[in-house]
Image (cartoon, helix red, strand yellow):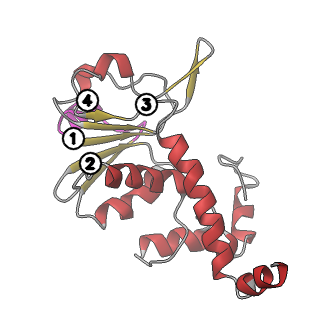
Amino acid sequence: MFQQPLSKDISKLINEIPYEKDIEGISEVSMGKLFLGERNINIPCTSKAVIEILDYYNVDLEGKNVVIVGRSNIVGKPLIPQLLNRNATVTICHSKTKDIDNILKKADIIIMAIGKAKFLKANMIKENCILIDVGINFEDGKIVGDIDFDDVKEKVYGITPVPGGVGVVTNMLLIDNIIRSLEKQKNFKKFFRDKL
């Protein structure tokens, strides 16, 4: 397992991990399978956590305008196929996106993953949208998200907190991916049967 982000000179080492053991789901093979719609694969945990949270609260994504702010390999990019598989209309914004405020104001759901403390403000969103905050930043010795929680909380339908939101679910899904990877291995049942 590699902890992202990695420097560019060693990031290709991820592809040395056998596909079956890629518990983070971030190798080129894993990402390719995700984008091709294959099932029974390990999906990057943080992006999968976003989907799990939306599922838990029965948020119907079909036809919804979902804006992802951030294009990382562990959140933004892997969210695209997951959201498209649920028939959402997906827009990606990043540091070079022009007129981001206008794009955000049209979003039903905004997923923030850019690493800029309290970037998203109430004047950038429409009433009753759903906000998922993946950002982890430090401000005055405290962990804060990419969303200015106090500024937007009265305007939104729902919002995930930082800390205590996506990160908690991400950790759970990493453990789930470990168990799923073990189950895929031929000798898994034999190993545990011999230990009992």
* Observer-nearest of 38 and 35: 38
Secondary structure beneath dot 4 equals: helix
Front disc: 2 or 4: 2
What residue does disc 1 label? 107
Cα–Cα span, label 4 and label 3: 22 Å
Residue 109 part of the magenta segment: no
Cα–Cα span, label 2 and label 4: 14 Å
Q: Is residue 2 left or right of residue 146?
A: right
Q: Is residue 183 left or right of residue 151?
A: right
Name which quarter of the figure residue 149 lies in: top left
Q: Amino acid at mark 4?
A: Asp
What residue does disc 4 label? 101
Q: Which mark is residue 161?
A: 3
Asked if the residues shown at circle 1 and circle 2 are in contact, with their CB atoms under 8 angstroms apart, the answer is yes
- The quarter of the picture where the C terminus appears is bottom right
Asked if the residues shown at circle 4 and circle 3 are in contact, with their CB atoms under 8 angstroms apart, the answer is no
Percent x, y of residue 119: 40, 24
Q: Which mark is residue 66?
A: 2
On screen, residue 50 above or below 163 = below
Is residue 4 visible to the viewer in this orientation of the structure?
yes
- The quarter of the picture where the N terminus appears is bottom right
Secondary structure beneath dot 3 equals: loop
